[in-house]
Image (tube, rainbow, N blue to C red):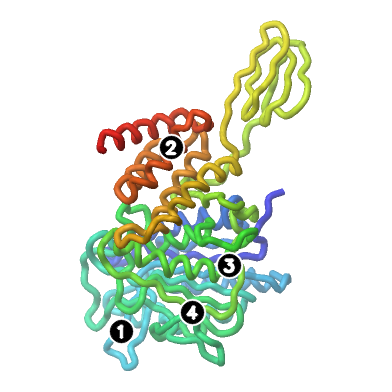
Amino acid sequence: MPRQFTNGYALLIGVDQNSVEEWALPDVSKDIRALTQVLTHPGRCAYPADNLKLLTGREATRQGILDGLAWLHARLQADTSGNATVIVYYTGHGWRDESLEPPQFYLIPYDISQEQVRSRALRATDFADAVEELKPQRLLAVLDCCHAAGMGLKDLRLGLPVGYARSAIFPPQLVAGEKALLGPGAKGLETLALGKGRAVLSSSTGDQPSYLRRDGTMSIFTYHLIQALTGHAQPQEGATEVLVSDLMSHVWRHVPHSAQADWGADQTPDYQVSGNFPVALLLGGKGLARGQPAPDPLEDVAAEKPSPPVQIDTGGGAYIGGSVTVGGNFVGRDQIHISDSTGVAVGPGAQASVTQGLGGDELARLFAAIYQQIEARPEAPDVDKEELADTVQKIQAEVARGEQANPNKVERWLGNLAKMAPDILDVTLACLTNPAVGIAAVIRKIAEKAKAEAGSAT
C-alpha cells in the first residue's frame, strides 16, 4: 500500500479574486492549483487529501482565512500522534501602511474595501498570532506577498491606496533565544519563528516584486518551491522525505537566477528557520536512486489511474511462466503483447510483439556520463553548470516515459543545450541516437534531427 505523509496538514490561501476588481490577482490561482496537486499526489508529497484545505476566490475573506486557521487548529487537536507538520501558504497582496509609526503590515483578503483598508485587511500580527495558536510540532509558513506591476508580474498596472506600499512580509529575526539562520526582514510575523521546528519563507525581500515565470505557468517562486518538493533540492542519498533545509536552500539559490534570466530583475527570497524537519515525502516515500533524475515539476501530476488488468486469450492453449508486464515465455495460439522482454510465443500461429524500454537504473547509467562531462567543464561566466544539469535532467525524465514522451519538450531542451553548451549537446545526442539504446522512436527521430542540424552548423 502506498505511503502517506499521514500527519502532514496544509492550509493554502490564494487571494486571486478581489471585491475591488482592479486589485485581483488571477494568476495566483495557477500557483495554488500546482501546489495542491504536488502536495496531494501519492507519488509526490503524499499528503492525505482530507488534511489539506484550499481557500481561493470569494472564500479568501479576512474571516475565511481565520476560519481556515481554526479548521487547521481542530485537525491538529484531533491528531494525537505528537508528530504533526503544518504548511500554511499565502499568496496574494502584501501591503505596508507607511502612515503609521512603526509601519503596519497587512495581508489583503478578498473582501477588502478601498475606503476601509485598515479595518478590512488582515494585520500580519493577527495572522501570526492565529498561526502560532496552532502549536504544531513543526511549522512551515510560506508567504508570496509582494506583487508589483509590469512585465509578467502577478499584478496589474494599478495604484495602491494613498499611504500604502507593496511589501514582502516576513520575520525580522528569531527571538526568545532562538538563532536566525538568515538575515533581516520586515515586522509583523516574529511569533511564527518561535520554538523548535519553525520555518518562515518569503518570496522576496523588502520592496522586491514577485515575478511570474516568462512562460506564464506560475510564479518563479512557487515553481522552485515545487521543484524542491519533487526532489530537485539534491537531498541526501537514500532520503525518503523532503527536509525544510533542502527546500529553503533550493529556493534561495534558484529564484534569483530565474528572475535575472527571465526578466533581468532582482528577486531574493528570505527565510528564517529554527530546527530541521521533514515537510513531505520524497516521491511518495520512494526517494531518488543514485543518478536518477527528479521529475519535471511542470508535468501533469493529476492522480495516476491504475493500469487496466491484462487479459490474455490463448485460444485454448496454455501459457507458461512469468508476468505479462515484465516478460516470460508464453504458449498459445493467439497473439501476445509482451513489454520490456525478449518474449517467446509457442504454438500454431502464435506471435509475440515486444516493446522494449529503458529501466530507471539503465537510463541513469547512460546519463551519468553526461553529468560527469558537465562537472568536468571549466567554469564559464555565461554558462551555469547547475542550469546545464537541470536541462539534462529534464531530458532524462522525459525519455524515461518511453512512447509517452513529449518530443516537443525534448526538442526545446536540446535547443537550449545547443545555445548554452554544444559540447554537452553532442554527448547527449550521442546517447539518444545510439542504436544499441532502447530510446523511443519519436525521441530518437528528434535527436537525429538535432544532430544533423548541429553538424550542418559546423
Q: Which residue is drawn at 36% across and 53% down?
A: 217
Question: What secondary structure is marked by label 1?
Answer: strand
What label does residue 60 carry, if any?
Answer: none
- Residue 245: x and y in percent read 54, 71
Question: What secondary structure is marked by label 3?
Answer: strand
Q: Nearer the viewer, mark 1 or mark 3?
A: 3
Q: Distance between the residues labelled 1 and 3?
A: 35 Å
Instruction: Name the amino acid, label 3.
Output: Leu
Q: Quadrant of residue 105 in the image?
A: bottom left
Q: Name the residue under label 1.
A: 97
Q: Can residue 445 be seen in this view?
A: yes
- Residue 64: x and y in percent read 47, 69
Q: Do the residues labelled 4 and 2 touch (CB within 8 Å)?
A: no
Instruction: Name the amino acid, label 4.
Output: Gln
Q: Residue at x 37, y 79 (%)?
A: 106
User: Is 33 located above or below residue 279 in the figure?
Assistant: above
User: Is 432 located above or below residue 2 in the figure?
Assistant: above
Q: Mark 2 points at which residue?
A: 430
Image-based side of 339 in relation to 331, left or right? left
Q: Do the residues labelled 1 and 3 touch (CB within 8 Å)?
A: no
Q: Distance between the residues labelled 4 and 3?
A: 14 Å
Q: Mark 4 points at which residue?
A: 272
Q: Name the residue under label 3.
A: 243
Tell me which numbered mark, 4 or 3, is placed earlier along the sequence: 3
Tell me which numbered mark, 1 or 3, is placed earlier along the sequence: 1
Dot 4: within a 10 Å radius of its alpha carbon, few (fewer than 14), some, or many (20 or more) residues? Answer: many
Q: Which of marks 2 and 3 is in front?
A: 2
Question: What secondary structure is marked by label 4?
Answer: strand
Instruction: Name the amino acid, label 2.
Output: Ala
